[in-house]
């Protein structure tokens, strides 16, 4: 008697009905997510087989993948397989989503690179973009099995897919075992239901279900003895199938009159008491050569190629072995690769290898795979599980491949490098090299404190000029990024007296010193350091040093008020470093300076395009730098009155380890919420805003914190305290910030006059006039006129500022200037002019949703008896088309046209994730579930409008 390997699902009617509904929904354009849980062999894969086939027949793109235990430390290994993205695809549509290989360094700067573009972050964005494009073409079903073995990045990406599945034609189905219990998987489980997803736990089969399955497999109704024997399977379908097959192989089953029963002659082999026993019994039927080859295969994980198996086994042609394993139901094809028919088969084989023998087999497998050109992350994944049993040979391989491994599998590299440091002597040259690689890794991914610790240990223990130079560069770079500019100066002083420091490293450190001095406002000292660093960079042909020196020069020119000069230096530096992805940190800084300069020169569209490019580039570096870039973009959106866009961008921010950036994000949120009078958020959380003293050298954070704290006090009826806080901007340390935001000084004059503090008002007006002299740009000149107009009750000067804000597209400043003009007209007795300016200000505030600004304006006009005929900004509807913001309306129009999120992002100069946020808001406000319904609803409205 032969037992078939696969049969359809028996029982589980409710579960099958749920899956059928989900497939029908996604085929109709309504997405969803499902997590199927259950013990090994409970039937998770079998349950999915028929629905996935039905989805394919209904026109859905169906993609199936599986995670494996060895892949836990390989970022995105499961997702790239799921989405059909080979590591080195020749197809450009797929190659862009593959984890990029490390490009070899060819210039003299090869050892100064610390912050390369993160291949994992870049690949994640490209894979998500690939899913977006697939969904734009039609319904998509993604099925990913064994999520308990998924790497952390895959789980994070899967959570993001599930979070957005309801908003597009995407059905994301994952399966997992109940153990191991991983926090990331538990978080996925918690998030699913609130997002509209489902969690399905598969229980053991009932007694009737066991009987039905056994009947299908054995070809007859099980008799009493067989039924009792199957009770030991505890309702597990795999155990039932394997037990029946073992009994059949041993001749213990006989069939008669439609009944299958245990044979009285052969009896019951009593050694088959567990699922492991019956699997071992199946494997025992294989030849000795096949068993040996499959033990080696178990070291490679549940999926492998025939070439990898041949190389790892170190024997000749294994075709007959593979055919034997396929015939016995131990292996099955997985496209061009092979895998164990069930992961338990590989696990049982792995456990049969004695630990002493396992290390030897592993070493040979690694050596053979390395010789055959296997990817280094694949080799490293084999080493890690058995690293405690290795005898030291693995450290030589790690030292040779650490740099590439750090790029491609950072978490795996960190584990191996930390283990290597603990098991190599501190005076061993290889120890210092491994410490260097690990320090670079932690500089990129964190914790940076560990990176600094390793760098200092290198300085104490080696005379290697390159290792010493990179350690000093790393320490200075960490301090610069954290805003610890005094530490950069201290690092330079220590480096100057270090005879181990080579000229290239010295020049690079001098460029960092120039940057630190520029941020401190020590412009003369910074220019001196920059000039020397630039000359040394040219002499040494070091693009890195030249780039950092020019970056410092651009910062210094900008702070001196020479935006044209800053732009020229930034563009020169960008041309010098080219598209080298190893210098992405520097490139982001240069793009930031470029955007500031373009805005200052009145070229906002170019500034917007520059920031969009910076956001795309930052997305390839990991969440930290991306989040920093997003805060900068949100700042610009806030200034230009795109408050909904600013909030959407701030919602994308996920990783801001540095307090200054956390504070900047919170301050921007507080300002928008306060000006919109958005309930609890508008309170500004004084405990955060009143945190410890913030140095003025913290870009964005320090000045925005002051403005947010002042507004929070003014809203609560404490104008004098608000003035006292805002007056801090008059300190010399904030001069550059008030040139970047000249409207703040106008706000300071208004607040000072409101509490009859003309001295502070005059000081602020003089500061604004000085800024316009230092940096005679349209914005600074308009602000100077605005301040003088307030101080001297001169409406004509305010009209100059108003004209500028109209052309510069800065609605918040336009509304504030119109409000001030209305007050001046009212005070002079010109009620008609006051009413006109007041009405226009309220209209601007209505478009912004600036409820607080409108209420303040009304309070200022009330003593003069001037009303504009409307009460203020009308509240935007909470639902329906009228609830959509301007940006949401544009996004909705492009959704209707069938564009994918990446295409919409490219057209509107937004990020893909910002578009995701807008689409989510659109669906919620319109009360629909899918993009297709948005298109249908919009089309219906358009037809009705045309008919009228």
Image: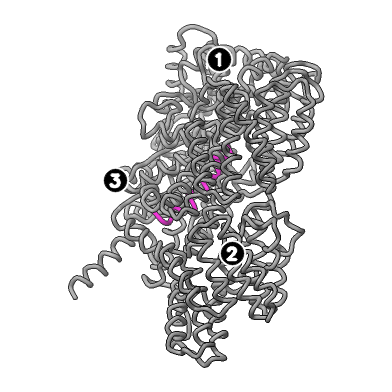
Q: CA distance from mark 2 to mark 1?
A: 69 Å
Picture disc at residue 769 = 2
Of labels 2 and 1, earlier in sequence is 1
Above or below, 806 against 541 in this view is below
Residue 263 position within the rendered picture, expressed as x and y whole percent measured from the top left: 51, 29
Residue 148 is one of the magenta-drawn residues: yes
Q: Which mark is residue 159?
A: none
Which of label 1 and label 3 is nearer to you?
Answer: 1
Q: Residue at x 66, y 38 (%)?
A: 514
The residue depicted at 49 percent of the width and 41 percent of the height is 568
**Direction from residue 60 to residue 45 in the image, left or right:** right
Give, as a single range, the part of the protein colored magenta.
146-168
State the SS at label 3: loop
Q: Secondary structure at mark 1?
A: helix
What residue sits right under mark 3 in the picture?
Answer: 59
The residue wearing badge 1 is 370
Instruction: Specify the quadrant of the image occupied by residue 523.
Output: top right
């Amino acid at each position: 008697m032969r037992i078939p390997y696969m049969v359809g699902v028996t029982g589980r009617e409710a579960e099958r009905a749920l899956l059928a509904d989900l497939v029908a929904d996604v085929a109709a354009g309504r997405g969803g997510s499902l997590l199927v849980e259950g013990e090994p062999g409970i039937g998770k894969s079998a349950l999915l087989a028929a629905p996935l086939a039905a989805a394919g027949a209904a026109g859905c793109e169906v993609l199936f993948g599986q995670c494996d235990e060895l892949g836990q430390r390989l970022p995105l290994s499961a997702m790239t397989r799921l989405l059909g993205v080979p590591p080195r695809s020749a197809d450009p549509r797929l190659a862009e989503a593959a984890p990029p290989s490390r490009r070899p360094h060819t210039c003299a700067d090869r050892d100064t690179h610390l912050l390369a573009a993160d291949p994992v972050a870049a690949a994640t964005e490209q894979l998500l973009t690939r899913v977006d494009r697939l969904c734009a073409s039609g319904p998509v079903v993604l099925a990913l099995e064994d999520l308990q073995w998924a790497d952390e990045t895959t789980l994070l990406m899967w959570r993001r897919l599930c979070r957005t599945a309801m908003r597009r034609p995407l059905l994301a189905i994952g399966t997992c075992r109940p153990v191991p219990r991983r926090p990331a998987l538990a978080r996925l489980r918690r998030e699913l239901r609130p997002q509209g997803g489902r969690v399905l736990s598969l229980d053991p089969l009932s007694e009737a279900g066991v009987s039905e399955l056994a009947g299908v497999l054995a070809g007859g109704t099980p008799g009493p003895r067989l039924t009792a024997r199957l009770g030991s399977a505890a309702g597990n379908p795999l155990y039932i199938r394997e037990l029946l097959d073992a009994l059949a192989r041993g001749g213990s089953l006989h069939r008669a009159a439609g009944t299958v029963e245990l044979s009285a002659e052969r009896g019951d082999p009593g050694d088959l008491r567990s699922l492991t026993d019956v699997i071992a019994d199946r494997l025992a039927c294989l030849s000795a050569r096949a068993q040996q080859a499959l033990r080696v295969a178990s070291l490679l994980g549940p999926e492998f190629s025939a070439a990898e198996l041949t190389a790892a086994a170190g024997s000749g042609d294994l075709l007959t072995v593979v055919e034997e394993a396929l015939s016995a139901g131990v292996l099955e094809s997985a496209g061009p690769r092979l895998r164990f028919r069930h992961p338990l088969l590989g696990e049982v084989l792995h456990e049969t290898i004695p630990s002493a023998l396992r290390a030897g087999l592993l070493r040979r497998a690694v050596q053979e795979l390395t010789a055959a050109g296997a990817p280094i992350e694949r080799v490293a994944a084999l080493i890690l599980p058995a690293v405690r049993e290795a005898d030291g040979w693995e450290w030589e391989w790690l030292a040779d491949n650490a740099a590439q491994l750090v790029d491609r599998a950072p978490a795996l590299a960190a584990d191996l490098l930390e283990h290597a440091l603990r098991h190599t002597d501190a005076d061993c040259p290889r120890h210092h090299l491994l410490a260097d690689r690990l320090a670079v890794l932690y500089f990129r991914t964190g914790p940076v404190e560990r990176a600094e610790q390793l760098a200092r240990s290198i300085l104490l223990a080696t005379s290697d000029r390159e290792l010493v130079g990179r350690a000093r560069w790393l320490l200075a770079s960490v301090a610069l990024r954290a805003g610890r500019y005094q530490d950069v100066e201290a690092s330079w002083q220590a480096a100057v007296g270090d005879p181990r420091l080579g000229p290239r490293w010295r020049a690079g450190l001098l460029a960092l010193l120039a940057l630190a001095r520029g941020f401190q406002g020590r412009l003369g000292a910074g220019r001196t350091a920059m000039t020397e660093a630039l000359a040394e960079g040219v002499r040494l042909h070091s693009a890195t040093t030249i780039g950092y020196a020019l970056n410092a020069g651009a910062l210094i020119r900008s702070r001196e008020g020479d935006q044209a000069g800053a732009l020229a230096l930034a563009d020169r530096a960008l041309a010098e470093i080219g598209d080298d992805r190893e210098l992405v940190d520097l490139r982001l800084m240069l793009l930031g300076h470029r955007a500031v300069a373009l805005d200052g020169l009145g070229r906002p569209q170019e500034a917007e395009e520059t920031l969009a490019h910076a956001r795309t580039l930052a997305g390839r570096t990991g969440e930290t730098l991306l989040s920093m870039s997003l805060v900068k973009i949100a700042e610009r959106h806030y200034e230009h009155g795109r408050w909904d866009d600013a909030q959407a961008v701030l919602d994308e921010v996920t990783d801001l380890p540095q307090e200054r950036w956390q504070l900047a994000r919170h301050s921007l949120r507080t300002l928008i919420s306060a000006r919109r009078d958005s309930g609890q958020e508008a309170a500004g959380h004084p405990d955060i805003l009143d945190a410890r003293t913030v140095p003025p050298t913290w870009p964005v954070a320090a000045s925005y914190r002051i403005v947010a704290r002042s507004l929070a006090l003014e809203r609560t009826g404490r104008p004098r305290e608000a003035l006292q806080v805002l007056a801090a901007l008059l300190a010399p340390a904030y001069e550059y910030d008030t040139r970047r935001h000249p409207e703040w000084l106008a706000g300071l004059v208004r607040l000072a006059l409101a509490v009859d503090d003309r001295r502070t008002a005059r000081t602020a007006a003089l500061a604004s006039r000085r800024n316009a002299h230092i940096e005679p740009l349209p914005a600074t000149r308009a602000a100077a006129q605005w301040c003088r107009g307030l101080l001297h009750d001169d409406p004509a000067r305010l009209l100059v500022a108003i004209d500028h804000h109209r052309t510069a597209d800065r609605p918040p400043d336009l509304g504030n200037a119109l409000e001030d003009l209305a007050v001046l007209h009212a005070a002079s007795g010109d009620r008609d002019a006051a009413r006109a300016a007041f009405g226009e200000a309220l209209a601007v505030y209505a478009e912004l949703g600036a409820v607080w600004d409108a209420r303040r304006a009304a309070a200022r006009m009330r003593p003069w008896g001037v009303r504009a005929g409307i009460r203020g900004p009308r509240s935007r509807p909470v639902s329906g088309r009228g609830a959509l913001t301007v940006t949401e309306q544009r996004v909705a129009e492009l959704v209707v046209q069938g564009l994918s999120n990446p295409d919409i992002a490219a057209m509107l100069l937004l990020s893909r994730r910002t578009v995701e946020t807008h689409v989510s808001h659109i669906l919620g406000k319109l009360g629909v579930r899918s993009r297709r319904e948005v298109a249908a609803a919009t089309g219906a409205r358009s037809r009705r409008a045309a008919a009228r």
